[in-house]
Amino acid sequence: MKKNLMTVLIMALVVVNVALSAIIMITLVPATKQANKLITDVCTAIDLELESGKVFNPNAIPVEETDVVSLTNNETMTFNLLDDPQGKSHYVVAKVSITLNKADSDYEEKAPLIAGREELLQEIVTNTFLKYSYNEVRTTDGQEKVRNEMLEQIQELFDSDFIVAVNISNANYQ
């Protein structure tokens, strides 16, 4: 009789255990899925930020692995700046070039495409300068913002990050 009573007690405990396990699964699985989605989103954001760091650091690339292409045919060009609040026009006269990473996997395929797109690249430069005022482009931070905006647009045009920097030289602001 004792054996039967123990068997019934064990079976009751097994049924209670299964029922409680089912309740825990029903309540915890949705919360766990949400936590996993959040973790995946955070990891994705971190990967994107780490990936974007290499784009804006051309100094990490050895000089022998870079190539410089002039967007202004090695001549100074005049670009309009945003008019000041008094309506006065300002200009920047500068040479603009881009630095290419020859070690990038897209270099061999996409670098030859630059030769046919000088006008598009000059338009990007011109339109970017038109967004900034005289006072903004004269500061170091302003110049960096202009370069970064040009770089992003050019990289978007070629759908690649083999272009690692935009260089503005011999700049005169007026």
Image (cartoon, grey):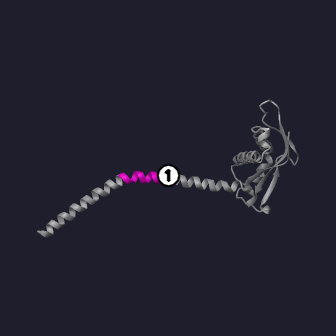
- For residue 130, above or below residue 155: above
Q: Residue furthest left?
A: 1
Seen in the image, is 99 located left or right of residue 28?
right
User: In this view of the protein, which residue sits in the foreground, 69 or 51?
Assistant: 51
Q: Which residue lies furthest to the top in this view?
A: 87
Residue range of the region highlighted in magenta in the rendering: 27-39
Give x and y (percent) for residue 149: 72, 45
* Residue 76 covered by magenta stretch: no
On the image, numbered disc 1 is attached to which residue? 38
Residue at the image point whose x is 78% and y is 35% from the top: 82
Residue at the image point whose x is 21% and y is 61% from the top: 12
* Residue 36 covered by magenta stretch: yes
Tag 1 secondary structure: helix
Give x and y (percent) for residue 112: 78, 52
Q: Is the magenta stretch mostly helix, strand or loop?
A: helix
Residue type at mark 1 is Leu
